[in-house]
Image: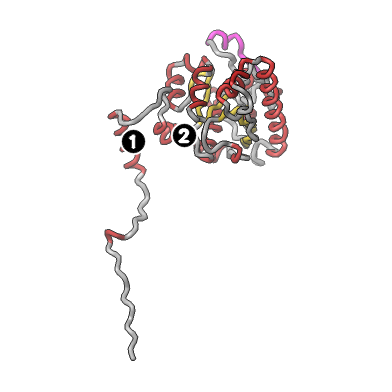
Amino acid sequence: MSVPREEARVIPISAAPSFEQPDPVAELLALIRRRITGDYEVDEFGYDAELTDKVLLELIRPLYNHWFRVETVELKNVPVEGGALIVANHSGTLPFDALMMQLALHDEAGRPLRLLGADLVYQLPVLSHLSRKTGHTLACREDADRLLRGGELVGVFPEGFKGIGKPFSDRYKLQRFGRGGFVASALRTGVPIVPVAIVGAEEIYPKIGDLKSLARLLGLPYLPITPLFPLLGPLGLVPLPSKWMIEFGEPIRTDDYDPSAADDPMLVFNLTDHVREVIQQMLNELVLRRGYAFPPFM
């Protein structure tokens, strides 16, 4: 007795699954075409998600992955949805830490970060335009509250220029946190405060001096002297390849307070001081965990 052979099932070419990779050239041309024709969207703050994701973050991703070799810790503490205030230490002479934290949250937490910037940022024509495009906005009460109520992650560096421009001898020592405006915004909107410690930025431009007179002339908060700048000219602007770690701490809840608590200066001060202490402790521990800032060959 013969057993009938099972016939092979032939899948038509048109029905076969496609494993073709996206054509990067075609994607780039499509992007350019949309930009030229105006077929893209920005929100009320000027944030251009497509330009940020496809162009600006792509430009700094090699720094994140290969130059600074950024390692994130405890990303589980970042809320997967809803508003939250991301509060971090500030350092490094130039604000690379803001960009690296933004990229970390974009790539590894899947959430855009809306950073609050100082007035000086929005007084410079090109930088102001780029900052708006990448989702940054002026560090003011109205903008911060609207973004938080809209369910956004809002990033703030309470040390401001005091932190980013401090000398290398004061590395990983937090400066004063201002008047606590960020805490008041969190209280008014009832969102959690996520403390963040960034280790690695202090070593990219070790500041050993300051050209104060020239800085005042140019309207800048400082003009740093580093071991390589201005000695090596433009080459001295290349950041050193320090090893970075970014740790996201346990959220500090504010929804147990009434929104009117934002008008209590003593409560705002105490919460601000608590956040500062938490971040300082995180920094102390993370510096030890990170170990040497530079690879063995340097």
Q: Which residues are magenta?
A: 208-218
Looking at the image, which is closer to me, 255 or 231? 255
Secondary structure, mark 2, is helix
Quarter of the rendering containing residue 30: top left
Q: Residue at x 58, y 26 (%)?
A: 190
Which residue occupies 34% across, 31% down?
Answer: 40
Residue 161: x and y in percent read: 60, 18
Tell me residue 5's x, y (percent): 33, 81
Residue 213: percent from left, percent from top: 60, 8
Please tell me whether mark 1 sits on a helix, a strand or a loop. Answer: helix
Residue 22 % position (x, y): 36, 47
* In the displayed structure image, the side of residue 67 where residue 18 appears, left or right: left
Q: CA distance from mark 1 to mark 2?
A: 15 Å
The quadrant of the picture occupied by the N terminus is bottom left
Question: Is any part of residue 37 visible from this angle?
Answer: yes
- For the residue pair 210 and 29, the one nearer the viewer reads as 29
Quarter of the image where one finds residue 251: top right
Q: Is residue 139 magenta?
A: no
Magenta stretch: dominant secondary structure: helix
Mark 1 highlights which residue?
31
